[in-house]
Amino acid sequence: MELKIAVCIKSVPDPAYYDKITIDAKTKCLTRKGVPSIIGKGDKVALEQALKLKEKYGGKVTVIGMAPPEARFEMKETLAMGADEALLLSDRLFAGADTLATAYTLAQGLKKMGSFDLVLTGTESADGATAQVPAQLGECLSMAHLWNVKQFSLLSDNEIQATVGLEHAVAEYIVCLPAVLGIARDAGKPRYITASGIKAANCKTCKVMGNAELQAEENRLGETGSPTWPGDITIPSMKRQGRVLEGSPDVIVEALTAALRVAGINIQRKAV
Amino acid sequence: MAKLERGSYKGIWVIAEIQNKSIHSVSLELLSKARELKQQNCLHEPVTAVLLGENPDAYTGILSEAGAEAVIIAQHPALEIFQNETYALVLQGLIEERRPAVVLMGATAMGSDLAPTLGAKLQTGVAAHCVDLRLNEKEDLVAVVPAFGGKVLGDILCPECRPQMATVRPGILAKPVCYRKAACKVEQYNPAEALKKDSGRVKAVSFIPEEMKGVSLEEAEVVIAGGFGAASHEMWELVEQLAEVTGGAVGCTRPPLDAGVRQRRTDDWDKW
């Protein structure tokens, strides 16, 4: 059997540059100037699962994202990893979307690309990290959905069995396809991009689509279509009192254990 | 997006969660917070806990002590193991009928999946993983959410849709208050009608609790945390050792998790 798999990707500011993010005091907008965008690791884990399924069963992997046109670069990265085609939904009308408007827009994009057996996402984005898009995408597509899927396997042409991570527990589910799966971050390591992968990506297409072509309901897009509205934003003070201990390792260890004892933490010497 | 008459939606609900045969601490924290919000803003409607599952009657006492003035219980064998579809359908039915203004859940594995599913079904807004909640002068919910790994805190409002939904991480709000011998109205709600809408696409097969190793992060007196500087296997080993000798729990920020040196335990996926 051949599988048609879609993977949702979000272009996010590189977490390594978070200290460069500032807030404009007047407009209360985030300034991301000089902060490069990347694909969050969680999304790549989902893409890896899709590529593995394709290798096993055959089929096609389509990557979809909603972002400004600059995100073409990140979409191309997914093609270099092995995805077959990419769709970037890009329009001013999509801007300012909360999770519900985002899920709606992605769902409309996926419908334009055809039908899918599986839609994979990460559990959450690296920036907003609401973890809400997978479930809401499932609802918008009227598909079954699971979140925090640690592993899954195909039982038949139209059923999968999946293990979902809960706190202090895992639950097993049987789900009818088509389905949306939010893949857990620890489900598997994403592959590296190879030189031949980059070469191959040059022959693949990344389509950029605005709403003129998508033709989604405008009142469900972007800021207009978002039930949640952003209010004030603040940068909390995370200052902690630092203390540097100096001297030889023995001296430092003595000082450290003494300081911990004062704080009420008793360190026991481990029997060797 | 359905815009509704705000005035007909009243009161605060907490969707309580049963985990390992007891009520999750975050449900109790939310109930006490809900009572505080009710008192501060002179609301009339009772703070209501909603409990789904099989045989949930035993828990009304503890819910009432934490602040619930009313408890709605939906019992059904189909609700024994959490399934986003069945749980969301039952809650959707209840909420559309009773019209609470605010619906709160713990940002646990269950809540993080259920809240957005329910939000999409109700076409309303959900603020994810909040660290604080308040009501503004219009009695609208203001949910404070972290973004960019906690670098930024933003207010989220949902002024035009009802109910206003939010999830809150465990251990963030104050410990639950104890309301002794408080009157509490307990009501049984028959979910059979709502469950008829279940398409049966998602079927829970089994639920396997995992044995807890070490001290849980919420209950630990000592937490040894590693960040960017500990994102190597050698450094992480030291963090683990220190935790062991201090009898503490281990915590980390994202870099050790992304570097794969910290195996995410099932119980701390939402705490980094």
Image: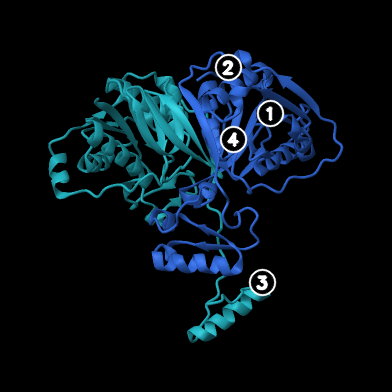
Marks 3/2: CA distance?
Answer: 54 Å
The residue that appears at 32% across and 18% down in the rendered structure is A215
Of B129 and A176, the residue lying toward us:
A176
For the image, the number of numbered tags is 4
Which chain's colour is blue?
B
The chain ID associated with circle 4 is: B
Q: Is residue A16 visible?
A: yes
Marks 4/2: CA distance?
Answer: 24 Å
Residues under numbered marks 4 and 2 in contact, where contact means CB atoms less than 8 Å apart: no
Mark 2 or 1 closer to N-term? 1
Chain A's shade in the image? cyan
Q: In this rendering, which labeled residue sits more in front, label 4 or label 2? A: 2
The disc at residue A263 is 3
Q: Which residue is mark 1?
A: B50
Q: Is residue B162 visible?
A: no
Residues under numbered marks 3 and 1 in contact, where contact means CB atoms less than 8 Å apart: no
In this view, B183 is above or below B121: below
The disc at residue B195 is 2
Q: In this rendering, which labeled residue sits more in front, label 2 or label 1? A: 2
